[in-house]
Image (cartoon, grey):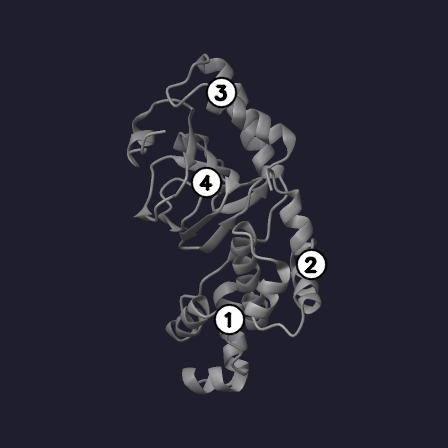
Amino acid sequence: MARIDLHYPDTIRRDAAAFTLVRDQVEAVASHSHRKAELVHLIAGNLTLQSADGIWVVPPGRALWIPPGIAHSTLETGNVEARCIFFEPDLSPHFLPHCHLVFVHPLLEAIMDRLTQSGPEGAIDAAREGRLVAVLIDELAAARREPFHLPLPRDSRLKHIAERLLKQPSLRIPIARWCAEAGMSPRTLGRLFQRDIGMAFGKWRQQLHIQVALRKLERGATVSMIAYDLGYESPSAFITMFKRNTGQTPGALHRANPDT
């Protein structure tokens, strides 16, 4: 399809303006926001987005909810097939105030598919569309949350650490050295990470490795290649970490994705 004007969905006065996105190569998109809420359901490909809440890797078979007015950008490029649905802001419920990623079960997918088939201007009557959207939002709120989110710190000292690891995920610098560079004690580092992003430093680094792995798996890398690239002693050590955090092995998660 032709390039979508980022402002066009906000001009459509319907409960749900739905688009199908198919790209051989998705370009990075600068930070922007919509007056509407947005739902991005990845059918196939590779997509990474960033908001103030952090970085989100969206694997196939998952959907990212972005509330109205939340600035976000597309970081990762690649082949993409996705559904994008924009909701009027008064339909955005109070219990979905933040970005979150969910697993798309068959009912969710069927509703999104039906809305997308009707096109952005809507080929179904408003009453029926309203009923579909109401069920869709209820199902989104109840859907299983997915752990493929990397929160980003706001403290300047922690941001320095995070930025270095984002550029070089395989870095294995001892905590003492990170603390020396940031001018703080290990206790202070741990307390700041917990306060700023709600998890320990080691847990955050594991979440980063999971995101890196998801992107590399989609590009065809093997689990062994990823494990050694990230500095793990063995593929089994990496698989254990991945499964502990996601509930699945990297291979099982990748095989469960549609069209892989």
> Disc 1 and disc 2: Cα gap in Å?
23 Å
Q: Quadrant of residue 246?
A: bottom right
In front: mark 3 or mark 4? 4
Secondary structure found at label 2: helix
Return the disc, 3 or 4, that comes first in the chain's sequence: 4
Contact flag, marks 3 and 4 (Cβ < 8 Å): no
Q: Residues within 10 Å of mark 2 (few under 14, many from 20)?
A: some
Position of 19 with respect to 105 (left or right) is: left
In the image, is 165 to the left or to the right of 207?
left
Give percent across and percent down for residue 51: 40, 52
Residue type indicated by callout 3:
Gly
Specify the label residue 127 is tagged with: none
Ranked by sequence position, the earlier of labels 2 and 4 is 4
Q: Which is more N-terminal, label 1 or label 4?
A: 4
Which residue lies at the image location 54% right of the left edge and 69% below the top edge?
194
* Amino acid type at image mark 2: Lys
Q: Are marks 1 and 2 in contact (CB under 8 Å)?
A: no
Residue at 59 percent across and 67 percent down: it is 203
Q: Nearer the viewer, residue 44 or 59?
A: 44
Q: Which residue is mark 4?
A: 80
Query: The C terminus is located in which quarter?
Result: top right
Relative to 5, is 64 above or below? below
Q: Which residue is mark 3?
A: 130
The circle on residue 193 is: 1
